Image: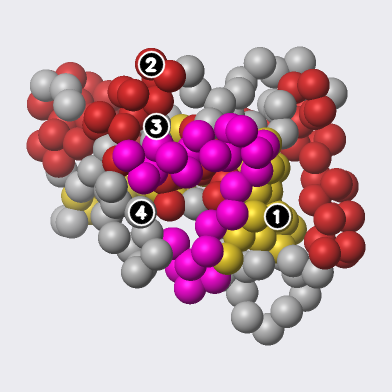
Amino acid sequence: MSVSDVAEFVGIARTAAGRFILTLEYLGYLSYDASGYSLRLAVLEIGDAYLLSHKLLAVAHPHLASLVQEAGETASLTVLHRGSVVYVDRVHADRVLTVNIIIGTSLPAYATATGRVLLSGLTEGELDEYLEALVPESLTGNTAIDREEIRKRITAAREQGWSLADQELKLLSSLACRLDESTAEDSTSDHSWQLGTCSGAP
């Protein structure tokens, strides 16, 4: 990426973007070649520090592994970030067919079971803002792209405490339920922590 690309993507002035880029390059997070700036391996240290800083991950991982053993399906832990779900832990079931989702993968919240249960934790005002800014895409034939239908599915997740996504993002199904601080035995108040089980899908 060029300095102009970064400035446009972040929404800041080109001069400000240039200063940030030079700082990140000096710290070893970026490198520059003929094609522009790119990330270096040092950025993984930031992600690793984030994962290690949350006790919830250490608490949840054995339960994910146990869930996989009992259900025979892949289990994941996700958080809500800027309208997307981000995978922060994942335990794979022992099967031939798997979906290429790794820690750090980001997917649109409206089209996933985990996303809907996380969105169900928003206030009505926050949900209104999310839906107003949302530009939904038809990812499969089952993806809801009507905002009122998306709201309906999120509301159902709030009332039920779980959500099922049937071939809405990929041609697989997934089931998710919400994990909050009372069940996680963790001091975090972030409503977007999420536990979900899935069949190789989000």
Q: As rendered, which of 88 and 177 lies closer to the eye? A: 177
**Magenta stretch?**
148-172
Q: Find the distance from the CA under tag 1 to the CA under tag 4.
A: 21 Å
- The amino acid at mark 2 is Gly
Q: As rendered, which of 197 and 57 lies closer to the eye? A: 197
Q: As rendered, which of 3 and 172 lies closer to the eye? A: 172
- The amino acid at mark 3 is Arg
Q: Find the distance from the CA under tag 1 to the CA under tag 2.
A: 29 Å
How packed mark 4 is, by other alpha carbons closer than 10 Å (few <14, some 14-19, many 20 or more), is many
Q: Which residue is mark 2?
A: 125
Q: Find the distance from the CA under tag 1 to the CA under tag 3.
A: 22 Å
Sequence-wise, the earlier of marks 1 and 2 is 2
How packed mark 1 is, by other alpha carbons closer than 10 Å (few <14, some 14-19, many 20 or more), is many
Q: Find the distance from the CA under tag 2 to the CA under tag 3.
A: 15 Å
Element under disc 2: helix
Q: Position of residue 138 (x, y in %)?
A: 29, 60
The mark found on residue 144 in the picture is 4
Sequence-wise, the earlier of marks 3 and 4 is 3
- The amino acid at mark 1 is Thr
> Taking 96 as reference, is 37 left or right?
left
Quadrant position of residue 127: top left
Q: Position of residue 98 (x, y in %)?
A: 61, 74
Quadrant position of residue 148: top left
Instruction: Tally the marks.
Output: 4
> Taking 79 as reference, is 83 left or right?
left
